[in-house]
Amino acid sequence: MIKVDINKTLHGASGEMDLTINLQIKEGDFIALAGQSGSGKTTLLRILAGLEEAKGTIQIGNDIWLDNKKSLAPQKRKIGFIFQDYALFPNMSVEENLLFVKKDKQLVKRLLEITELSQLAKRLPNSLSGGQKQRVSLCRAMMNRPKLLLMDEPLSALDPAMRTKLQNEILLLHKEFGTTTIMVSHDPSEIYRLASRVVVLELGQIVNDGTPKEVLLQTSGSQKFSFEGELLEIIQIDVIFVAIVAIGQQLVEVVISEYEAKNLKVGESVRVSTKAFAPTISQ
């Protein structure tokens, strides 16, 4: 069991904010941290990694990483951390980047096989694609067989096809190594595919905690689907009003009433839902 009970005052664009987290996580779980930018997700990862200070306690099994007496140094915490920017050593080959963490050639071989990088073992990072670099970063994070794997939007810079491929590899490594994984993500499909539990933060507080279905499927009554998006434009075509809404990486058109056209504001967050194939839009 992993127990996290921490507090830290953050100074953001909107002023001071208290990050207050009380969580119990089963070993082997895959947790997704969701919420708007600035809600404290990345700071929580950095506190778990020992890269930022906080008050409270962090206990991993029988090991105390943080209490009122000590804070275990990052290098002594058995973690793997995957950043958005890969952070590979440019003058080392793929294989050397992994062996730098731990001199275990058998483990390197296994990780490169799982991620289909065996043929690139002798290549330098600057000759790799973004997806290949992130796979190397993932392998390197697993070299210490971490008790806790932390990922901060690791796939956000990749195209959809590559994201799906790496999601499968992340899930495979997570299961094979029995690692407890905590990942920051804004992608509902990614969260649904990978996570067993979703924790939603808002202004430093946990506002929702449950399975991906419980948290992400926000429908009620006879609604068939419901998605949040940004209202980009309202167009009038003769007597019909059409709202253009960005949902993820797609744009959708929704026919709205004259009343809705007057009350909706471009740039605001809206929810698009449908009942019996008749889409509706609301603030």
Image (cartoon, grey):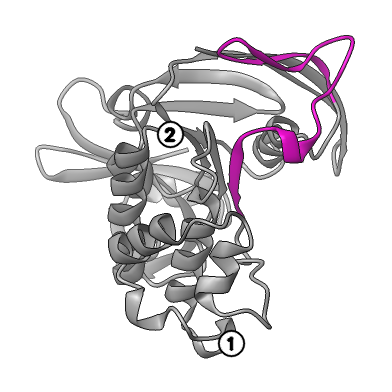
User: Which range of residues does the magenta coloring cover?
Assistant: 54-82
- The numbered mark at residue 240 is none
Residue 168, magenta (yes or no)? no
Q: Examine the rendered structure and indicate whether residue 273 appears above or below residue 167.
A: above
What residue would you read off at disc 1? 126
Question: Who is closer to the viewer here, 139 or 265?
Answer: 139
Amino acid type, label 1? Asn
- The numbered mark at residue 179 is 2
Quick one: SS at disc 1?
A: helix
Quadrant position of residue 280: top left
Q: Examine the rendered structure and indicate whether residue 258 appears above or below residue 50.
A: below
Q: Earlier in the sequence, mark 2 or mark 1?
A: 1
Q: Residue furthest left?
A: 276
Q: Is residue 213 left or right of residue 2?
A: left
- Residue plotted at (41% across, 68% down): 235
Task: Report crowding for label 1: few under 14, some 14 to 19, many 20 or more residues within 10 A (C-alpha).
Answer: few
Task: Report crowding for label 2: few under 14, some 14 to 19, many 20 or more residues within 10 A (C-alpha).
Answer: many
- Residue plotted at (50% across, 46% down): 185
Residue 215: percent from left, percent from top:
37, 26
Q: Is any atom of residue 93 visible in this view?
A: yes
3D distance between C-alphas at marks 2 and 1: 29 Å
Residue 6: percent from left, percent from top:
75, 16
Amino acid type, label 2? Thr
Residue 76, magenta (yes or no)? yes
Q: Is residue 93 left or right of residue 74?
A: left
Residue 128: percent from left, percent from top:
48, 84
Q: Is residue 205 left or right of residue 133?
A: right
Q: Residue furthest bottom?
A: 127
- Residue plotted at (85% across, 44% down): 13
- Residue plotted at (74% across, 41% down): 75
